[in-house]
Amino acid sequence: MIYFSGDRTSSIEGTATLASKNGDAILDVEFDIIGVPVHAPYNVISTDYTSYAVVYSCSEILGITYSSTSWILTREQNPPESLIKKGYSILEGQKIKTDSLKKTNQENCN
């Protein structure tokens, strides 16, 4: 995963394992952050298996708050706007807020 902090680009690696035994598309993703394993549930809420996936994650933090994140992932570096709109529609249909989604800069992605 690549994330941005100001003008800096950083990356993080993790391992995903299937968390559901009944066929649901729920992954347990583990990241090593400063030597501490951090787990996050990744729920694939929609995919066509060839061009996009819509993913949602929500984790409790210290039992007092939560962090939720969603992604519209595409295989194309610059997907058609119709595919992005479809992703937004899927998230909104699940009552997941989309106002904080930001397009990732795809320049220099070799």
Image: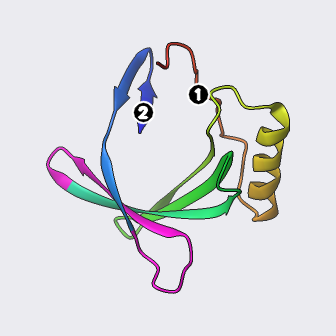
Q: Quadrant of residue 28?
A: bottom left
User: Distance from label 2 to label 1 (Cα)?
Assistant: 9 Å
Percent x, y of residue 19: 42, 75
Q: Is residue 19 magenta?
A: yes
Residue 4 in the image: above or below residue 52 = above
Q: Residue at x 77, y 39 (%)?
A: 84
| Residue type at tag 1 | Thr
Percent x, y of residue 20: 47, 79
Of residues 66 and 31, the one nearer the viewer is 31
| Residue type at tag 2 | Ile
User: Pointers 2 and 1 in contact (CB under 8 A)?
Assistant: yes
Q: Is residue 94 left or right of residue 19?
A: right
Magenta part of the chain = 18-36
Q: Is residue 102 left or right of residue 9?
A: right
Q: Is residue 73 left or right of residue 99?
A: left
Percent x, y of residue 49: 64, 55
Q: Residue at x 45, y 85 (%)?
A: 21
- Say which residue label 2 marks: 2
Of residues 2 and 48, the one nearer the viewer is 48
- Say which residue label 1 marks: 104
Residue 98 in the image: above or below residue 95 = above
Q: Residue at x 42, y 33 (%)?
A: 2
Q: Is residue 87 left or right of residue 105?
A: right
Q: Secondary structure at mark 2?
A: strand
